[in-house]
Amino acid sequence: MEIKLNDPFATEMLKAQTALMQVIDPELYVNIVDLGLVYGVDFTDASKAKVTMTLSTPGCPMGDAIIGGVENAMGAAFPDRKIEVDIVWEPQWNYHMITDGGKAQMGLE
Amino acid sequence: MADISIGKAPHPIAVLPFYGTGALCFAALAILLFLAADELTGHHFSPHLMAIVHTAALGWGTMVIFGAAYQLLPVICERDLYSVPLAVASYFMLTFGALLLVWSFWIFEVGTVMITGGASVVIAALLYTINTCVTAARNQRTTPQQAFIVSSALWLLITVTIGLLLAINLRYTFIPRNHLDLLKLHAHAGLAGWFLQLITGVSTKLVPMFLLGKSKREWLLYAALVLQNVGLVLFLIDGYFNPITAKMLIYGGIVALGTFAWLLYLADAYRNRLRRKVELLMRHAAISFTCLIVGFALIPVAYYFSDARWVSIYGTFLFLGWITAIILGKTFKTLPFIVWSSHYRHLNGKVKVPLPKQLYSERLTVYQFYLYVAAFVSLVAGMVVDYTPVIRMALLLWIMLATVYVVNVAKTIFHKPMITDGDKTQ
């Protein structure tokens, strides 16, 4: 999840990132931002926040728990916006998308 | 949202009863083994050994595998489980059937009770097969893992159908073949068809997932699928029409090659893993695969040596080594997730919730690992030297192991929800 400082929604993006870091993938014990599952958040429509993300594998048994987590965390951070979660499979998630912080949490480095 | 299934854990009712009952059957198995300690190295066609083998195969192995399969089918097939009611019905049929079969073998009462038990298990297998095939068919993309799951389900159905026919044949003889030879076909359809192919399919999905590893050699899985099935089909056809001779070892060799291809795939995923440290629970898998390799090596030994104990040792490596080790290891890599999902799925991201690994006792899994190694090694040693006091002592360790396992499974299943809201824990 990349945040550009010149992005007109940089403040919202930072707030969203903080919220999404509360959502843990219960299988890997790491938050979904550090896992690289969140591809972006769109705030252009003032009435909603649309999270574009993926899952580690299609059919992931924790899929609805993670999506529910995103809705809960984003709903609390942006109570005035409707939260939409768009699951995409391209680009396909792989282990190289995990941030250095995520790898450290998983004891990979 | 993309038009693809988002993983939904099935309702816990489709999974938890299998784990709970399987754990209790494991305890019952340890007790039955203890009660029959002096018969373990005798001929396998004895009432108590038949009861023990069916407790291991149906009450323990198949029971837990049904639960795990209902939980993992959505992961493997990338579609939700077709039917929870069918899964629940299969639980009742399997439990009822296994109880009747084990009881009727133990007291060796051939007839209505044994046949009813066998028929009940056939219905359970049929319900499981329908659920598996329909779930798999919903995904238009076929993976080797899916193919293994479907083929193993079909082999289960074949195995239990042969078993039912054998139970009927014991009471009303109608099959013009030696019953003991048919028993070998029944047993190996179950071992090389149901257990081997199911474990091959599930492990090639789960082991890379847990190790964060991958293998690009998918062709090994297709080779495994073909070799395991060709070897088994040849064995069953030849074994039905001809007496069991040394020629059958060739078919065993073909299945062994298929097993080797599968293990090569896992070894490749292991080499290419991100997670360098291998957890204790994953070491159970290593023991399991070693026991399977030893099991294959014991086939010619059991064939050429007339001493009945080698057949028992062969069975011990497969049921108490290969199958039991993989179940002990994977239980706490799968069961906590379904419990976690039912309690905390809706709270994720809202309040601080425990992790799935906090739902069971890690300390008990350490005891479980070392108890298992001690129990297995001492049992095999006792059987090799054919010395009942050592076997009995080993079986006491099995009872302790089963107790630890049952306690930990119960702790997970009966977990009370605990959430932290700010500084408050509720």
Image: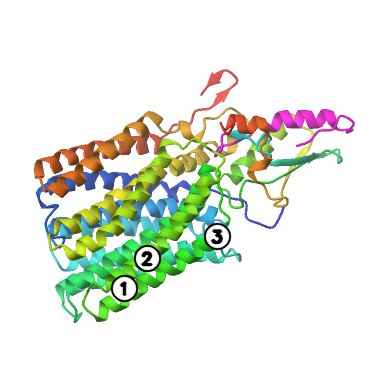
Q: Quadrant of residue B77?
A: bottom right
Q: Which quadrant holds the C terminus of chain A?
A: top right
Q: Amino acid at mark 1?
A: Phe
Q: CA distance from mark 2 to mark 1?
A: 10 Å
Q: Earlier in the sequence, mark 3 or mark 2?
A: 3
Pointer 1 or 3: first along the chain: 3
Per the image, the residue denoted by label 1 is: B235
Determine contact: label 1, label 3, CB under 8 Å.
no
Q: Secondary structure at mark 2?
A: helix
Quick check: B418 left or right of B199? right
Name the side, left or right, on which B309 lies relative to A13.
left
Above or below, A99 relative to B285: above
- Residue named by callout 2: B255
Q: Position of residue B8 (x, y in %)?
A: 57, 49
Name the residue that disc number 3 marks.
Answer: B218
Query: Mark 2 packing: few (<14 Cα in 10 Å), some, or many (20+)?
Result: many
Write the start and end of the magenta stretch as one range: A1-29
